[in-house]
Each structure stands twice: as structure tokens, then as C-alpha cells.
């Protein structure tokens, strides 16, 4: 598979696609924000196919693969940036680490990255301003573009963070949020999600870890892991052609029967019926 590289901290590209995407499936070594200015169709990210329309914003993280299938002529606005850009513009190391962790976790959430409606309005205005500055290149345009992108990244990070438990907010201790982000980042590696490994990684005794987690998230660690896995199962069922046995293997369930049992316990329906009842036509 083709893999694109970025040899500068960030890059801005505006593309018009009339009938077909000129790029086959390809991967990146950098972050890429893709804003749908106009048009509609399907966007496949890491084998997961989702519909797209004007006003949506997608985030590709390093090593993600994607391609577009257009239903109508489409205009795309790309903002590409790498770790060098994040490090150059992060004033605090702690802020940088949090932002990078949240951005990396975006790959688990297919579809538009914006969950808050008011943020969709703000992002549209920001990107219109970026396009204007990039096109007209007025005085201080580079400085303004960088400021706009920094603001955009904060909004993106906030929307990604909405996948964290309801009890997590600005007052939550940094270590608690770091544990949540660690779980999301390692959701495909059951061994790393064992309590003894998490306690060792964060320097918290195993006997205290469970109480600490529940205190800051209002749910047990195992409940959070299970709930998060089931959300990923739903995504696979709705947006991919993966078999249930393949999903079970990917997410660390013992087998297909184990996944069926847990899914029905929490969702009240088995995975096959869930997929049939919510099938998106392509």
C-alpha cells in the first residue's frame, strides 16, 4: 500500500474531485484533518466505510489508511501536520502529551470527529478563515493560519474526549484521564489491560487501582473496558464487512459465542440482529 510522508510541520491543500478520487487506498505517516466543503459519498478509513457529506470533519492518524468514493462532485480541504508541528506549538509538555494521546485514539471512532453541534458551526468558520488566509496570503497570514489550526486541534481533542466516561471533566485528576487514554490506546491488547500491568505502568498499587478508577469515572475499570469494546463492536458491525468471529478475535473476546453473550447482555440483542436492523445501504 502507498504510504504518504510529510516533510514539513504542516501543509494545507484544497482539492476539487468531480467524479472519482484519483488516489487509491493509501496510508499516512502524519495526522490529517479532512473537511468536506461540498459533496457526498463514502469515506473508508481502516476498512470501515462511512457516508460523508458537507460540513463533516474526519481525522486520520499516523498509519491510518483511507480512500473516497464520490456520489456527487466533492471539494475537500486537507490540513496535514506531524509530531514536529505539535511539539513546536505546545507550550507545555504535559499539554502536548495529552493532545497527542487523544489524537491517536481518534482512529477508534469512525465517521465525523465532531460530536457537538456548536463545534460544527465554529469549525466551519475557522476553516473558512483558513481558506481565506491561505488563498489571499495577506500580511501575517502564516501566523493567523497557525493560530486557527491550534484552535481547531483543541476543538477536535475536546470532541474526541467525549468518549470518556460522563464523570470525567476539567476537574478530573490528570492521572485518571491518562489511565482512560491508556485503556483506549491498548484496547486491542488484552494483556496490557490487566490490572497488574496498568498499576505497574502508572505506579498505583493494584489493590488501590480499582477504587481510584471508580472514584474518578463513576464506573469500574472492567465496566469501562467492556463498554468501550462494545462501542467498537457496534462500529465494526455497522461500517465494515468483518465477520463476528473476526471482531471477537480483534477485540480479545474468547470466541464468537463469548462476544454474542456479552453483546446481548449489554445491548439486549445479538450482534447479527443488531447489524441487520441498522444496516447502512451503500
Image: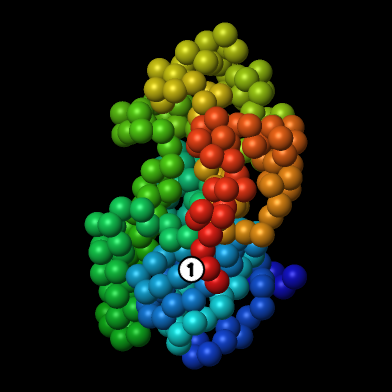
The x, y position of residue 267, in whole percent, is: 50, 37
Return the residue nearer the eye: 30 or 122. Answer: 122
Relative placement, left or right, of 53 versus 59 is left
* Residue in the foreground of this view, choosing between 257 and 22: 257
- The residue where tag 1 is placed is 51
Residue 119 visible? The answer is yes
- From the viewer's side, name the closer residue of 154 and 223: 223
Horizontal and vertical percent for residue 229?
58, 38
Q: Quadrant of residue 147?
A: bottom left
Residue 205's image quarter?
Answer: top right
Estimate how packed mark 1 is, as few (under 14), some (14 to 19) or many (20 or more) residues with alpha carbons within 10 Å. some
Residue drawn at 59 percent across, 41 percent down:
270
Q: Is residue 247 left or right of residue 43?
A: right
Name the residue at 41% across, 65% down. 57
Quadrant where the N terminus lies?
bottom right
Residue at the far top in the pictured view: 207
Work out whether 257 lies above or below 79. Answer: above
The residue sitting at 51% across, 32% down in the picture is 266
**Is 227 above or below relative to 4?**
above
Describe the element under mark 1 as helix, strand or loop. Answer: strand
Location of residue 71 in the rendering, given as x and y in whole percent from the top left corner: 49, 82
Amino acid at each position: 500500500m502507498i504510504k504518504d510522508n510529510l516533510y514539513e510541520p504542516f501543509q494545507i491543500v484544497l482539492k476539487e474531485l468531480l467524479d472519482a478520487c484519483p488516489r487509491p487506498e493509501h496510508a499516512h505517516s502524519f495526522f490529517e484533518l479532512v473537511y468536506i466543503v461540498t459533496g457526498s459519498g463514502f469515506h473508508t478509513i481502516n476498512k470501515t466505510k462511512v457516508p460523508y457529506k458537507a460540513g463533516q470533519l474526519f481525522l486520520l492518524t499516523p498509519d491510518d489508511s483511507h480512500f473516497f468514493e464520490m456520489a456527487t462532485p466533492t471539494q475537500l480541504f486537507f490540513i496535514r501536520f506531524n509530531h514536529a508541528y505539535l511539539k513546536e506549538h505546545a507550550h507545555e509538555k504535559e499539554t502536548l502529551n495529552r493532545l497527542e494521546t487523544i489524537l491517536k485514539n481518534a482512529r477508534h471512532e469512525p465517521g465525523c470527529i465532531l460530536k457537538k453541534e456548536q463545534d460544527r458551526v465554529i469549525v466551519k468558520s475557522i476553516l473558512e478563515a483558513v481558506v481565506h488566509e491561505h488563498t489571499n496570503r495577506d500580511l501575517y497570514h502564516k501566523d493567523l493560519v497557525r493560530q486557527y489550526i491550534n484552535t481547531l486541534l483543541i476543538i477536535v481533542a475536546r470532541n474526541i474526549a467525549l468518549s470518556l466516561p460522563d464523570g470525567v471533566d476539567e476537574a478530573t485528576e490528570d492521572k485518571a484521564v491518562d489511565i482512560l487514554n491508556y485503556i483506549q490506546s491498548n484496547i486491542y491488547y488484552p494483556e496490557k489491560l490487566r490490572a497488574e500491568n496498568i498499576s505497574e505502568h502508572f505506579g498505583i498499587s493494584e489493590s488501590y487501582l480499582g477504587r481510584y478508577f471508580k472514584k474518578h469515572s463513576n464506573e469500574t475499570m472492567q465496566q469501562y473496558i467492556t463498554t468501550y469494546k462494545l462501542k467498537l463492536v457496534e462500529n465494526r458491525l455497522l461500517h465494515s464487512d468483518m465477520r463476528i468471529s473476526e471482531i471477537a478475535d480483534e477485540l480479545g473476546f474468547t470466541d464468537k459465542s463469548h462476544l454474542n453473550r456479552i453483546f446481548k447482555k449489554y445491548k439486549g440483542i445479538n450482534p447479527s440482529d443488531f447489524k441487520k436492523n441498522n444496516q447502512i445501504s451503500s
